[in-house]
Amino acid sequence: MIRRGVPSLSMSKLGVLNPEAIQEVNFAVGNHSANPTGHVRYPETDELLLLHYKYLNRSYVQRRHAELLTKRGSVDLENRWGYHYSWDEQQLDQQLQDFAKTSREVLNSTGAIIDDFDLHADLWWRLPNEPEPPEEKQKSWRRRLLKKIGLKR
């Protein structure tokens, strides 16, 4: 039913693994990246998309944010994780407008994935394999992401 979306590097995640081959996943905060150990093989191409349907309409987002706001713990608050759950109406409206402006067809009329994302090269599992701990990999990945979208120089 919903075929438009906003591709997002920060929401792109590997979500399928072979539990017999992976010893530890070692997810970073929010499962936005990981440092798996064991017999790790990343896909040659990304054939499966994890589509988030978070911004369906204003009332849905307001209800969902209010619910998630109550679930933030002390570590979340300390690190400002989930800060967007407390957006005021103006901030939420601006975000919804920004998403509407940048949305595009993600699925065609038959429901097939339109695979022309220009983000693939910057996904964390496509970056050079650097021997750094998961939290450092997450930080360096996040820095590259922020630079790419113009929030950091």
Image (cartoon, rainbow, N blue to C red):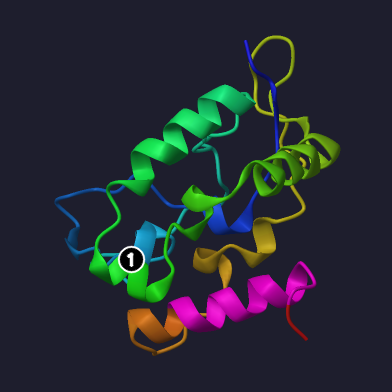
Query: Compared with residue 75, is residue 41 higher up or lower down, i.e. above or below?
Result: above
* Residue sitting at x 64%, y 51%: 8
Pinpoint residue 76: horizontal percent, then vertical percent: 33, 65
Left or right: residue 44 compared with residue 111: left
Q: Nearer the viewer, residue 88 or 105?
A: 88
Query: Compared with residue 46, is residue 33 higher up or lower down, i.e. above or below?
Result: below
Q: Is residue 148 magenta?
A: yes
Query: Compared with residue 36, is residue 43 higher up or lower down, i.e. above or below?
Result: above
Q: Quadrant of the N terminus?
A: top right
The three-letter amino acid code for the residue at tag 1 is Asp
Pinpoint residue 114: horizontal percent, then vertical percent: 73, 30
Pinpoint residue 11: horizontal percent, then vertical percent: 53, 51
Left or right: residue 29 compared with residue 44: left
Instruction: Tell me which secondary structure the magenta stretch mostly adopts.
Output: helix
Q: Nearer the viewer, residue 143 or 84?
A: 84
Q: Where does the magenta region start and end?
A: 138-151
